[in-house]
């Protein structure tokens, strides 16, 4: 594939790649980095791209995997705006307890193995359906259920070990 052909494809798919990366990362700057890395990887692969039926589909797959890697590597979802989860009245004791429990729960989710952590966040923070998580994570629905179950059990066990909250 020539540089000119690659440039045309890159210009055409860039918007879609940005949209996909922003969907996963919720951060335009991080999404821009992931899209640039995706296009660089594809440029390096340029001599082999003619063998692919759809370079656009390949680009979307690469951006999805790089986005998930970014989440795993940076644990960016550990810092979540509590207003996205629940409204907490910081003046009340109950609100303070809820905020502390929420903070500890996210710490426990971050301590899970990477795949369980990502799947738990997709399900319980992003509100994604199991089928959508399976497509996004590139695994079966049964694997999503298994990871959710293991993650939930680990968190419940940690709460028990720490005397609840």
Image (spheres, rainbow, N blue to C red):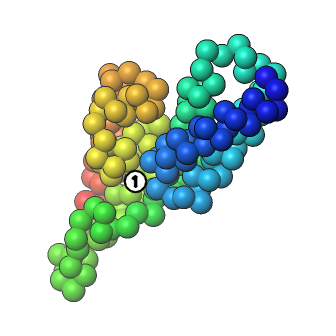
Crowding at label 1, few (<14), some or many (≥20) Cα neighbours within 10 Å? some
Total label count? 1
Residue occupying the point 70% across, 35% down:
8
Comparing 2 with 130, the one in front is: 2
Point out the image quarter for the C terminus.
bottom left
Q: Position of residue 16 (x, y in %)?
A: 52, 41
Looking at the image, residue 82 sits to the left or right of residue 78; the answer is left
Q: Is residue 85 above or below residue 68?
A: below
Taking the image as drawn, is residue 35 in sight? Answer: yes
Image coords of residue 161 (percent x, y): 32, 53
According to the picture, the residue beneath numbered tag 1 turns out to be 108
What residue do we see at 28% from left, 36% from top? 129
Look at 63% across and 47% down and name the residue there.
34
Q: Nearer the viewer, residue 29 or 121?
A: 29
Question: Is 78 located above or below residue 152 in the figure?
Answer: below
Q: Is 54 or 32 nearer to us in this picture?
A: 54
Residue shown at 30%/69% (left/top)? 83
Image height of 138 relative to 111, above or below: above
Q: From this viewpoint, which residue is outermost toward the bottom?
A: 91
Quadrant showing the N terminus: top right
Is residue 44 visible in the rendered image? The answer is no
Give x and y (percent) for residue 48.
Answer: 77, 19
Q: Secondary structure at mark 1?
A: helix
In this picture, is 122 found above or below 84?
above
């Amino acid at each position: 594939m020539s540089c000119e052909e690659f440039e045309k494809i890159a210009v055409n798919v860039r918007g879609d790649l940005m949209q996909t990366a922003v969907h996963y990362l919720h951060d335009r700057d991080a999404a821009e980095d992931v899209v640039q890395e995706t296009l660089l990887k594809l440029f390096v692969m340029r001599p082999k791209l003619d063998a692919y039926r759809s370079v656009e589909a390949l680009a979307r797959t690469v951006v999805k995997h790089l986005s998930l890697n970014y989440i795993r590597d940076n644990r960016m979802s550990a810092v979540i705006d509590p207003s996205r989860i629940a409204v907490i009245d910081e003046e009340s004791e109950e609100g303070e307890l809820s905020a502390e429990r929420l903070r500890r729960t996210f710490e426990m989710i971050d301590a899970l193995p990477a795949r369980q952590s990502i799947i738990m966040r997709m399900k319980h923070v992003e509100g994604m359906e199991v089928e959508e998580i399976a497509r996004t994570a590139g695994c079966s629905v049964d694997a999503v259920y298994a990871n959710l179950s293991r993650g939930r059990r680990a968190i419940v066990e940690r709460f028990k070990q720490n005397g609840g909250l």
